[in-house]
Amino acid sequence: MTLNPPADAATTQRSAIDQISREFIVRITNPTDGVSLPSILLIQSAKLSTAHFDGVWTTAPKGEIYLTFSAASGPEQLSYGQANWGHFFSTMTPLAPSAVTFKTAAGRRYESTRSNPINHANNPAMNDDGLIDATYWFVVPSNTRSGTLSIGPATTEGMEYQGFVGQALIPVHVAGPTTFKVSFPRHLTATTKSPPRQAQTIPVSSSPLNEILSVISLIFFGAILWKVRRRGRKRVQYLPVFYPPPGRPAYAAPPAPTPSPTPSTSINPVMTTRPTADRDPGLRVNVLGPLQIEPSTKGASDPIRSILAYLAVHDDRPQSADEIQTALWPDSMKVASVAQKTFLNYVSRARQTVGAQYLPETNGRPGYELINTSLDWRDFRTFATKATVSAKELAIELRRNALQLVRGVPFEGESSTFFEWAVNQKYVTTIIEAVTSVAHQLQADLVLAGDLDGAQWAINQAMLLAPTEMPLWRDLVDICEVRDDEGLMERFWRDAERALWPAAIKELQARLVG
């Protein structure tokens, strides 16, 4: 029988921590189509303790002890230009207790108990796939000091993301087993504790040695997590086969006009020529590639830069504090909502960074907004919209001007949680669809006009942010076929095999034959 100590009674806890700090690659597979992609499993530590924190200190039954471990997992975000970029599994239901087991050195096997599972269905995170988002623990013999923890194989539910867009929930298979050894000293550290009056995290022993090991583990674990999150920042320059063919000079599109320094906040501002030197060039925010804010905000923290980007993109109306906080501090961050004072400090620092002439005080306004600010995504939409109602020659120039604004993947390199709103609110998907559509129409007009170099340039610009979009590859194979260049076609297939799934390659081959 388990006995809970009185509310004000002190208890002696004996515990030890094994600082594991290891990274594993786990394959996640859709059994329906056979798609298999990697996820990264980070194991921080394991702990033996005679007391288990579950709101109150619960002492382990006589002759037994609690074993827990700390872990996190997230999809491996491939670099831009790599095959399967933007393709991963996430939004998974945490593994069932039976999928997490422990075997003692003597060979006795225990199945875990699972507590506090987290459901990411309504708040998917690109850096947390949900696979292990629960507390898994065991009750084992008190003389246990070593053994093997195993995770998987198992089946759970998850979502397959393609081009960073999630599909329906499906059964997914988690490969395994992923195993790691745990080992603890023979003599555990004794610590006297008083039961907490309100929820807090599981405490660790206050032993100086344990504290030092904990700090080292946190630093090491944080470095691994930082490495995983920053992998997407390493840009791979993706140069399709047509950029340019051997012996052919690179295609140079005419320079695009510079937007007005003080556009209106409407969705379709009027574009004008470059401002003169004696005029304030205004604040410029570019998101059609790595985030750029001009004048430079170098050194500004992610929350500040994200607030500025969020307000620039949401330019149809002022944004309330609640809307901004919900976007930048979503539930998937696993932290309480940011305090109002902290949020206001961030806004104040953002104002100091760019100036009150661009981010004014609310002063009775319904929310926050950027003024006297231009945005490349707004300019792109302006060019694209005007092209749909213009004569063909002008439409070609407008679409060319729109594509010249594209520098890479929207918000490329911004992998911190503060920028999850760009994906969750489907801005990345919307931009990719718009750019792909404009490139398709432009190349079609240029092919009819006999400008094959211009048509290839249009596809190349769109592939800077969507290198696996099949409409672009269909257009490209058609252009290569018209060129009737055997060397070019060979390089086309090499690039296609690097970027696309085998089924997509077969589709392109059938397109040539058909």
Image: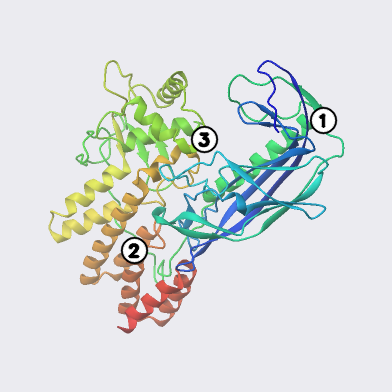
Please state which amino acid type lies under the numbered disc 3: Lys
- Residue at image coords 45%, 47%: 412
Please state which amino acid type lies under the numbered disc 1: Thr
Q: Seen in the image, is 426 located left or right of residue 397?
A: right
In what quadrant of the picture does the C terminus appear? bottom left
N-terminal-most mark, 2 or 3: 3
Residue 505's mark? Answer: none
N-terminal-most mark, 3 or 1: 1
Q: Residues within 10 Å of mark 3 (few under 14, many from 20)?
A: few
N-terminal-most mark, 2 or 1: 1
Q: Which residue is mark 2?
A: 459
Q: Which residue is mark 1?
A: 189
Residue 237: horizontal and vertical position, in percent?
Answer: 49, 58
The answer to which of 460 and 232 lies nearer the viewer is 232
Please state which amino acid type lies under the numbered disc 2: Ile
- Residue at image coords 45%, 24%: 346
Quarter where residue 133 is shown: top right
Q: Seen in the image, is 309 located left or right of residue 115?
A: left
Question: Considering only vertical position in the picture, is 227 above or below 62?
Answer: below
The answer to which of 405 and 158 lies nearer the viewer is 158
In what quadrant of the picture does the N terminus appear? top right
Question: Considering only vertical position in the picture, is 434 above or below 248?
Answer: above
